[in-house]
Each structure stands twice: as C-alpha cells, then as structure tokens.
Image (cartoon, grey):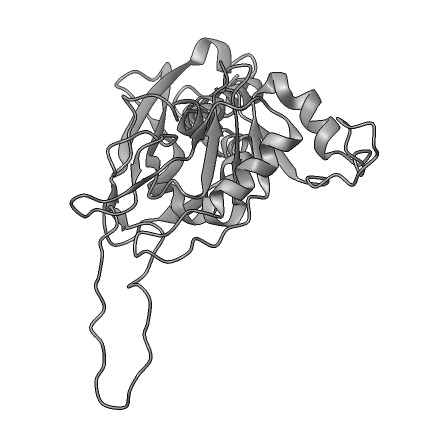
Amino acid sequence: MLDVLTWANDMYPVVLKRFQDRYDKRTDLIKSVIGYEALKTSNQYADEGIGGYGYVPDYNGTLITELNQKRGFKTIYTPKEKAAKATVHYKYAKVDQSGEAKKAGNKMADSLAMTQVRDFYNLFANGWNAAYTGSDSVPLFSASHPINNETGAATYSNAGTSTFAISSITATQTAAQRFVTFDGLPFDCNYDLCLISPELEPKAVEFFGKEAKLIPESAENGANPVYGMKFIPIKGFTAKQWAVADSLLLKEYMKLVEITSPMVIPNKPDNPLIQEYIGYMDYIMGWSDSRMIYGHNPA
C-alpha cells in the first residue's frame, strides 16, 4: 500500500520522465521546419525581415556614400503563457502507481505538444485568412505585400491559385526569383520545400519520390525538374492548398519563440488524497517576412 503522505512525491520522477520523452517525440516536426529562439534576458524578440542597407556603390577614395536605409516591417514576437492542470487521485494510484504516473506524464505531454503542433500547422492554414496578419498588415499569403515600410511602396504577391502540378511548382520557383528585398536588392532564394495538404501527399510522392526521376505527368520521359524535392503534409490545409518555400529562409524568418519551454509542475492541494500536475509553457509562433514562401489556394 502506498504511503498516503509520500505517494505524490514518489510519482513525480516517473511523471517527469514520461513527459519529457513524450513531448520531445511529438514536437520534432516543428523545429525541423521553422526556427527557434529561446529568450534569456528579454520577454520579446524582434526582427525586420529579409534585407540590408541597399546597394553599396564604388568608393572614390574620399567620399563614403550614405546609404538610403529603407525600412522593413519590424515584427515583435511576444510569447504568451499557457497553463492547465490534471488531477491524480490516491484511490487509483494506490492500485497502480506506475501506471497512473506514466499516464499523467504522457497525457500532459500530449496536450502541450499538440497545442504547439496545432499552432504550427495554423501558421500555414491561416495563410489566406485576413484575421491573421503579419507586421505588413496582410496575411502570410497575399497579392499585396508592401516591399518595404515606406509611403507609396510597391507590392509583391506570394499568393496564387494554381493546382498542384510540376509545372505549377517550377512556375512558382521562377516567380519567387523576381522578388526583391525591402532595400531593393535581388532576393536570393532556393524554393526546395513543398508544403501540401494530406490529400495531396500521394501526388507529392509521385512528383518527388525515388521513382520520379522522369516527369510522371508527361509521356515524353523528360527529366523531372523537382525530383527529390522535400515535402511536408500540413494538416490545416484544405484539400487543394499547397505552398513552396525556401527551407533555410523559413527557419530564419518563421519562428517558435519561447521564454519557458513546456514543463510539468507538481502541485499539492490541501488534500493528501489528491495530486495536481500543471502543464505550463510560454511561447509564440509567427513570421517576419513572406518572401520565403509562396502559397496556392485553387478554387
């Protein structure tokens, strides 16, 4: 029989280990796609997107040119706290302490991890939603992104309506090469990652898989220009939605920013027959530039 005065303390090491093991496995996807910043000395993280100070002219030996510093859109990441608790009862722990501890750790890990995973998917799923805008006041995928934060700035589009096809992918890659950074210089990118709805995954395997060295859509057996391209199913996408991105820039300009990594905390109420476990995390996800991705929402 478990000691009614110590049973809760005895359970916590098992709860914590199961939580840590489970959480790490469930969230591997997030940090493999977007960047990560752990805040140590501030409760905010700021970024201005892709660009520098503009074109650097020749030096004539005497005069150093002052660059015209066009401004990007400053994005401020401000993490938000999330917390919830679950209760374990002595009545059940005294029969199967190990089982109750493992269950508490696993379930709290699942709740915190899948909350973050859902937020990750929603970064892309809400890409066309006018209620979810970036620092340039338009959604992630838009036909009217201002190039910079200057009055009368020209715009660029990273939103299309093409159906998922090899020709659409290569056309999107070409379109992205025409972007410029906020300081007016050419945008250097490598659109090497495809984000697809789960319904498009069989087609993605056909386009990018190990048997796709030749264009599967053509009877002429031409070389497949997207052979070997990486792809990731995005569960928030509707059946026809898809996007192409630069995987390196995606990590740099789309972030998970944390002050406190997800944790499970024991809390003992004024009742020896009850033990609470609090799940807590303090984070936010967002993006500071949209040039690194191009989304399609076919009719």
Residue nearest the observer in this picture, 174 or 90? 174
Residue nearest the observer in this picture, 64 or 84? 64
253 to the left or right of 145: right
Residue nearest the observer in this picture, 167 or 200? 167
Number of dots carrying numbers: 0
**Does residue 104 sit above or below 43 in this rendering?**
above
Furthest residue toward top: 91
Residue 272 position in % (x across, y down): 34, 17
Residue 133 position in % (x across, y down): 28, 30
Q: Residue at x 60, y 24 (%)?
A: 164
Q: Mark yes or no: residue 32 visible.
A: no
**Does residue 254 sit above or below 241 in this rendering?**
below
**Does residue 124 sit above or below 49 in this rendering?**
above
Residue 68 position in % (x across, y down): 21, 64
142 to the left or right of 10: left
Q: Residue at x 36, y 52 (%)?
A: 181
Residue 299 position in % (x across, y down): 49, 13
Write down the quadrant of residue 257 in the picture. top left
Q: Residue at x 52, y 33 (%)?
A: 27
